[in-house]
Amino acid sequence: MIENVDLSVVDWSRAQFALTAIYHWLFVPLTLGLSFILAIMETIYVRTGNEEWKRITRFWMTLFGINFAIGVATGIILEFEFGTNWSNYSWFVGDIFGAPLAVEGILAFFLESTFVAVMFFGWNKVSKKFHLVSTWLVAIGANLSALWILVANGWMQNPVGMTFNPEAARNEMVSFWAVLFNQVAVDKFLHTISSGFLLASMFVLSISCWFLLKKREALLAKRSILVAGIFGLLSSLMVAYTGDESARTIAKVQPVKFGAMEALYEGKDNAGLIAIGLLKDSDNSIGKTKEKEFIFKIEIPGLLSVLTGGNRDAYVPGIRDHVLGNQEKEILSVMEKREKGIFARNVLTDYQRADLFKDKEQVANIKEVFRSKEFNDEYFRYFGYATINSPEEVIPNVPIAFYSFHLMVILGFSFIMLFALSIHLLFKGTIEKNRWFLWIAFFALPLPYVASELGWILVEMGRQPWIIQDLMTVTKGVSNITSGSVITTFILFAVLFTVLLVSEISIMVKQIKIGPKH
Amino acid sequence: MKRILSLLNRVFLFYYEGFRSMSQWGRRVWLIILIKLFIMFAILKIFFFTDFLDKKYDSDKEKSEYVREQLIN
């Protein structure tokens, strides 16, 4: 029961996970994107035989190496936290998490780490072509690593391809392909890697612009801008496309999160898309939770209906529809889902009793029930609702979801313009003269990091109160430990990761100032 | 067998020479990696991140019963 859980453990465990994930994510996207930029640059070198391209590749490879080395294994801490702070959750997810992470460890990480050595140590020791293949394999391996993690995360947002085994009290994978091709996982993978490509392109563009501002390394800077500008523009367009796809999927599988992203409380036809808006508390409430309303907004009429339903007349349900229910639109209320969740929980209680009294026939019957499609579709999918006490508990923090989503989108569109402008100025031959552009591009360096972190904040905060959508709340997933131990490790992590980040930045800045070897 | 040994020798020399001729930034980064891994696996994992269920229960059956209890109550 929620009352039996020390809520400060939940809050500190969440804060610790957020801290670790946010820091971890400062290292990862640059690896994802810069590895491909290196592969492209080295391909040009191998095809043209121009030594300048080799020098350019090696310079960016140095920065890649620093980021890769300092960021490596920071994600393992998240796995430590699963076993210690989130033991109920870890057990409940069963092999759904274990399988993708094992594949990652065996296949992708092995591929990546093996060929990284060739990438760094292999210049002039292996053939040009073998070196190039190694660089491409590092890029592919790094991105494959991301795939498996995102498949696991996608399952948490939209649990599919499994059945619950009451005997083991854990979920068991019944379809690897359903888990792998889960729509959320596919969208998430494409959106995440393309945002990594974008971030790395901005990294290369910003540092190249700094060289031009300092009137140094003009050839390296311009050639790097050529690659980063084109790769960045294509990536940012892909980010926009995959982001749109992701939002559509969220509207289907996590509709309350979608409502929070748009701060849409009342469902409507011809719903407009909010481009920019400012929220305040409204006089209306859902239970004890105050609704939000706009102080100011710029809205594109009908666009939300078109994007989610295909036409302007499509009805877009709001938060109220999903919390309080809408019979006309056949949307169940939270309390109706709760009834179904309680039914599923009672079946599990019956199993517990049958197991206790060694009633083998009943145990076998109930196991069969948990395997049946009807029970899963009608009841077990709402299992987590059994622990929801009041409907408003399923509403995430609307301002956090709304602002993180909209700021991310605004930044995303500004990146498209920035990359397009960089290519335009480069081909026009005036990029060095437009110092205003060089300064803007230089100071834009942290913005993709901000956008990328906002994306994760939306994903994880927008899913609350669920740790696994509709199946388990964060309160149910947490271990029965003391908050003191979590606070201690929270502080340790904050110190460790800050030291790592400062080290990375200082080593990188030093290498950038030194510049490429002549 | 001789070919395998020769291959292993070449792989060893590849890494050995790579590490020996490493730049200053490379050495510094490796030092950071080693310190980081030591802190993570020799301190944090052992003293602060013992697996909650492993610590409490010996068998999977006991762990299942505990989690089932948590799910029901």
Image (cartoon, rainbow, N blue to C red):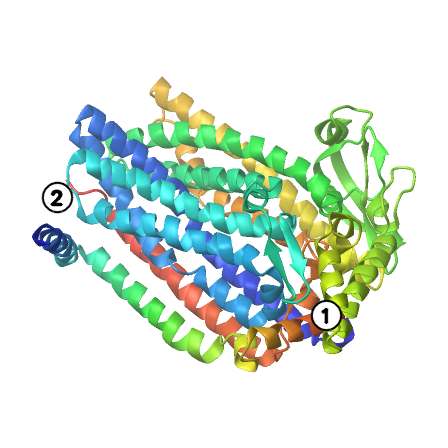
The residue to which callout 1 is attached is A360
Binning the other alpha carbons within 10 Å of mark 1 as few (below 14), some (14 to 19) or many (20 upward) gives few
Q: Residue at x 21, y 29 (%)?
A: A46
Quarter of the image containing the N terminus of chain A? Answer: bottom right
Residue A318 in the image: x percent, y percent?
81, 42
Residue A174 in the image: x percent, y percent?
60, 50
Question: In the drawing, does residue A464 fall left or right of residue A204?
Answer: right
Q: Chain of mark 2?
A: A
Question: In the drawing, does residue A502 fall left or right of residue A277?
Answer: left
Residue A252 in the image: x percent, y percent?
72, 39
Q: Residue at x 66, y 46 (%)?
A: A403
Would you place residue A286 above or below residue A331 in this image?
below
The residue to which callout 2 is attached is A125
Quadrant in the picture for residue A337 = bottom right
Quadrant in the picture for residue B67 = bottom right
* Residue A87 visible in the snapshot: yes
Q: Residue at x 46, y 65 (%)?
A: A77
Question: In the drawing, does residue A366 fall left or right of residue B58?
Answer: right
Residue A284 in the image: x percent, y percent?
89, 51
Binning the other alpha carbons within 10 Å of mark 2 as few (below 14), some (14 to 19) or many (20 upward) gives few
Callout 1 secondary element: helix
Would you place residue A391 above or below residue A191 in this image?
below
* Label 1, label 2: how far apart the Cα atoms are: 66 Å
Quarter of the image containing the C terminus of chain A? Answer: top left
Q: Looking at this rendering, what residue extends furthest in the front direction?
A: A361
